[in-house]
Structures are given as structure tokens and as C-alpha cells.
Image (cartoon, rainbow, N blue to C red):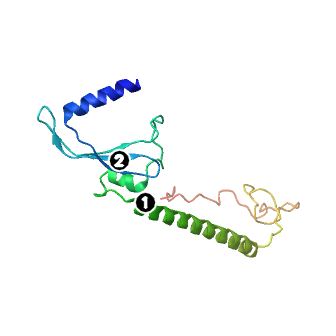
Amino acid sequence: MGWSRGVFRALWSALSKEVREHVGTDQFGNKYYYVPQYKNWRGQTIREKRIVEAANTKVVDYEVGTIPTEWEAWIRRTRKTPPTMEEILKNERYKEEMKIKNQDFYEQERLASEATSEELLAPPVQTQIKGHASAPFFGKEEPSVAPTSTGKTFQPGSWMPHDGKSRHQ
């Protein structure tokens, strides 16, 4: 399959008048090409292309980190000029510095939180559980064993519910 792809590519490039201009290579070995706008053999205008040729052609799937961020920005046309190797190395150093600073910051935060977490915690409190929240006497004193009643003062028919309507109107 590999040799047929090469033959097809050579035939296509001969017919399409596509001229690749090698723009650069990254530290992973990926090669970047620029194809300016041209007219094909049928007279159609083909817009410019930016192409990456992967160094590891056996790996088909794209993985994050296989193309440097600066080259990816050039491929996606978010930057006009291709990046220089000095720019890529400068950004790599900056990323490493940020990783180290980030690790130092989180280590300091972890140590500070361990030191202050003991100071911020309230001392444990002894709680007394009396009954259940659904009990009618929850939060009040427990009902006494001695009966209490309004039996001596109760009069039948003296209490009426208040629903806004009165029967005797």
C-alpha cells in the first residue's frame, strides 16, 4: 500500500501544478509546507494550503503534543508567519518555568493549609441525642409520666376550627 500511495502522490502533483514550499521542521521531526494559491488543470482556483507531514507516519491518530503550539497556530491560520526555532525554544523554557512555579505554589499552599487547618477546626462537642426529630416532643422536655389533662375545664363544642367561614352567619 505504501508504494502505491507514493505513485499516486507523484501523479497528482504532476497534474495539479501544486508546488510545495518547505517552510520548516520542528524538534519532533515534523515537516511543514506552504502551497500558494494556484489554478489546477481544469482552471479552478485552489486556495493556499498549509500542510504538516508527520515524522512518525505509522501513527495515524493525532495526539496532543505531537505538534508544537506555535506550528499548530500557523497550520490553523491564526498566525501569518511560521515560527522560528528560537521562538519555540523560548516558549518551551517559559512553559517549564511555569510548571516549576506552579508546583512550588501548590506545595506552599499545601503546607500552609496543613498548618492552619488544625487551628481553624473547632474542638469536638459532646452532643446529647434525645429522641428523633419527627417526635412531637423533639427539642422540648420529655413528656412526664404523670398525666396532664384539661378534662376538668373542657366543654364540648367550645372549640371551632378557624377556616374563614362561619356557620352561624
Q: Is residue 168 above or below residue 140?
A: above
The residue that disc 1 covers is 88
The Cα atoms of the two marked residues, 1 and 2, are separated by 14 Å
* Callout 1 secondary element: helix
Residue at image point 25% right, 30% down: 12
Q: 27 or 42: which is nearer to us?
A: 27
Left or right: where 139 falls relative to 166: right
Q: 11 or 128: which is nearer to us?
A: 11
The residue furthest left is 43
User: Is the residue marked by circle 2 packed among few (<14), some (14-19), or many (20+) residues within 10 Å?
Assistant: many
Q: Is residue 43 above or below residue 51?
A: above
Q: Is residue 27 above or below residue 127?
A: above
* Callout 2 secondary element: strand
Does the residue at mark 1 contact the one at mark 2 (Cβ under 8 Å)? no
- Residue 109 screen position, x and y as percent: 65, 70
Residue at image point 69% right, 57% down: 156
Res. 9 image quadrant: top left
Residue at image point 56% right, 60% down: 162
- Residue 157 screen position, x and y as percent: 65, 57
- Residue 138 screen position, x and y as percent: 76, 61
First in residue order: circle 1 vs circle 2: 2
The residue that disc 2 covers is 32
Q: 35 or 99: which is nearer to us?
A: 35
Left or right: where 89 falls relative to 79: right
Residue at image point 46% right, 37% down: 61
Q: 98 or 35: which is nearer to us?
A: 35
Mark 2 residue type: Tyr
Mark 1 residue type: Ile
